[in-house]
Image (cartoon, grey):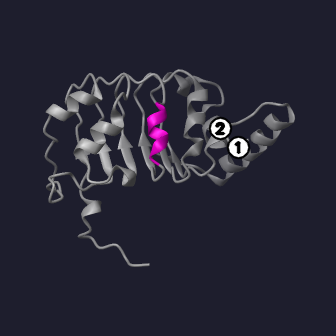
């Protein structure tokens, strides 16, 4: 397998649409991405060559037309592997997020997600390694961290904190206990 070059255009800096006071994802299409330390890399067609998107610190309550808007900006949305939706007004984990099978990092902290069962939707993302959900109402639920690690056993970090071997062991035990009592987790 060929080694990835630092100059590979797919590894450009994130498309940064944070702090734009966006009420909807569609509004981003009339915005210019924020300038970062490194300039955005663009394809000959003018699309951004990146695997990462920052939509944090906006006022988004849903992700309607997310795929279409990402396609408007990005050269290849199938390669999207890092999405920051922190500090918005999301109350659910939208199904569109599960369509990005290469997703490795998903930041959802500081939103309004009230049900732990929302996490179950993410079980279909085989490469998800880093997830943040702190600052959502579910964080206050008993067994929150254990539940998330049980549903997403491949996570390496939850809420910017590494998942320990002990937590993985407890999650396996909890999963066995739940299945003996007829309760299901997302990957059963």
Q: Quadrant of the N terminus?
A: bottom left
Q: Is residue 68 magenta?
A: no
57 left or right, relative to 63: left
Residue in the picture at 43% in, 48% down: 105
Residue in the picture at 66% in, 31% down: 143
Q: Residue furthest right?
A: 180
At which x and y percent is residue 181?
A: 85, 31
Residue wearing tag 1: 171
143 left or right, relative to 84: right
Q: Earlier in the sequence, mark 1 or mark 2?
A: 2
Residue in the picture at 13% in, 39% down: 32
Q: Which mark is residue 179?
A: none
Residue 184, quarter of picture: top right
**What SS does tag 1 mark?**
helix
Residue 58 in sight: yes
Magenta stretch, main secondary structure class: helix
Residue wearing tag 2: 146
Residue 54 in sight: no
Q: Quadrant of the C terminus?
A: top right
Instruction: Give the Cα separation between the discs numbered 1 and 2.
Output: 6 Å
Magenta stretch?
A: 94-100
């Amino acid at each position: 397998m060929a080694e990835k070059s630092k100059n590979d255009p797919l590894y450009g800096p994130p498309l940064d649409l944070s702090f734009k006071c966006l009420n909807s994802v569609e509004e981003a299409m009339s915005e210019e991405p924020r300038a970062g330390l490194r300039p955005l890399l663009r394809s000959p067609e003018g699309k951004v060559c990146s695997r990462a998107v920052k939509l944090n610190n906006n006022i988004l309550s849903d992700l309607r037309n997310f795929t279409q808007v990402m396609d408007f900006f990005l050269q290849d949305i199938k390669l999207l592997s890092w999405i920051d939706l922190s500090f918005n007004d999301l109350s659910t984990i939208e199904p569109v997020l599960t369509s990005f099978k290469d997703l490795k990092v998903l930041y959802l902290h500081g939103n309004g997600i009230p049900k732990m069962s929302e996490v179950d939707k993410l079980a279909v993302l085989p490469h998800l390694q880093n997830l943040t959900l702190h600052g959502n109402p579910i964080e206050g639920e008993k067994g929150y961290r254990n539940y998330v690690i049980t549903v997403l056993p491949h996570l390496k970090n939850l809420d910017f904190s590494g998942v320990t071997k002990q937590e993985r062991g407890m999650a396996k035990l909890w999963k066995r206990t739940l299945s003996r009592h007829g309760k299901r987790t997302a990957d059963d």
